[in-house]
Image: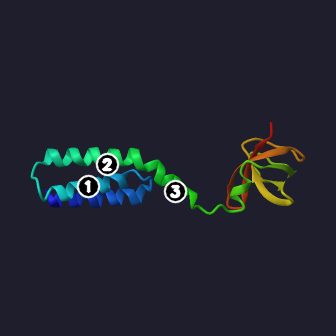
Amino acid sequence: MNIIWALIIIILIALEFATAQFTAFWYVLSGVISYIISFFSDNFLLQFLIFVTCGTLFMIIFKEKTIAFLKKNKVITTSDKLVGEYGIVTKTISKKQFGEVKVKKKKWTAYSDENISKGTKVKILSVSGVKLKVETHK
């Protein structure tokens, strides 16, 4: 059983690296517990129940706290601070062509899912590289 649990742990580690969703991580920890228990008990049902129970409990208890901790330490860039801000269109934006928006005395290339005329107040929805996605301010 030790080899099976070692393989499960390796697969779950690969899955976590592939998704980075902090879900498989908790089952990796419970897999390690089941791996250790496999040295003391040959009862696969017991090992599996511990694996599922511990993994689920770890995920319920620690996932949100871990994600909040990781986000707390995230460096917010100047462009990230623009999301939710307002600007003025300085060059008309169409669905098929970039326009320009002035935000905090700086001009940015902007795009939208709607046509927006020059002089219109817009809200910044997101930042992608050096381009802003905007919508008309309502």
1 vs 3, front mark: 3
Residue 18 visible in the current orientation: yes
Q: Residues within 10 Å of mark 1 (few under 14, many from 20)?
A: many
Residue 91 visible in the current orientation: no
- Residue at horizontal 79 percent and vertical 42 percent from the top: 115
Apparent side of residue 122 relative to residue 26 in the rendered image (left or right): right
Apparent side of residue 138 relative to residue 56 in the rendered image (left or right): right
Q: Report x, y in % for residue 79.
A: 71, 60
- Residue at horizontal 34 percent and vertical 60 percent from the top: 14
Identify which amino acid the numbered label 1 is placed on: Gly
Identify which amino acid the numbered label 3 is placed on: Phe
Quarter of image, res 52: top left
Residue that carries the numbered disc 1 in the rendered image: 31
**Helix, strand or loop for disc 1:** helix
Q: Report x, y in % for residue 67.
A: 49, 53
Identify which amino acid the numbered label 2 is placed on: Gly
Which one is in front, 45 or 110?
45
Q: Marks 1 and 3, Cα distance to the nearest angstrom?
A: 24 Å
Quick one: label 2 or label 3, which is nearer the N terminus? 2
Q: Marks 2 and 3, Cα distance to the nearest angstrom?
A: 20 Å
Q: Marks 2 and 1, Cα distance to the nearest angstrom?
A: 8 Å
Which one is in front, 18 or 114?
18
**Helix, strand or loop for disc 3:** helix
**Helix, strand or loop for disc 2:** helix
Q: Quadrant of the N terminus?
A: bottom left
Q: Quadrant of the C terminus?
A: top right
Residue that carries the numbered disc 3 in the rendered image: 69
Outermost residue, top direction? Answer: 138
Residue that carries the numbered disc 2 in the rendered image: 55
- CB-based contact (under 8 Å), mark 2 and mark 1: yes
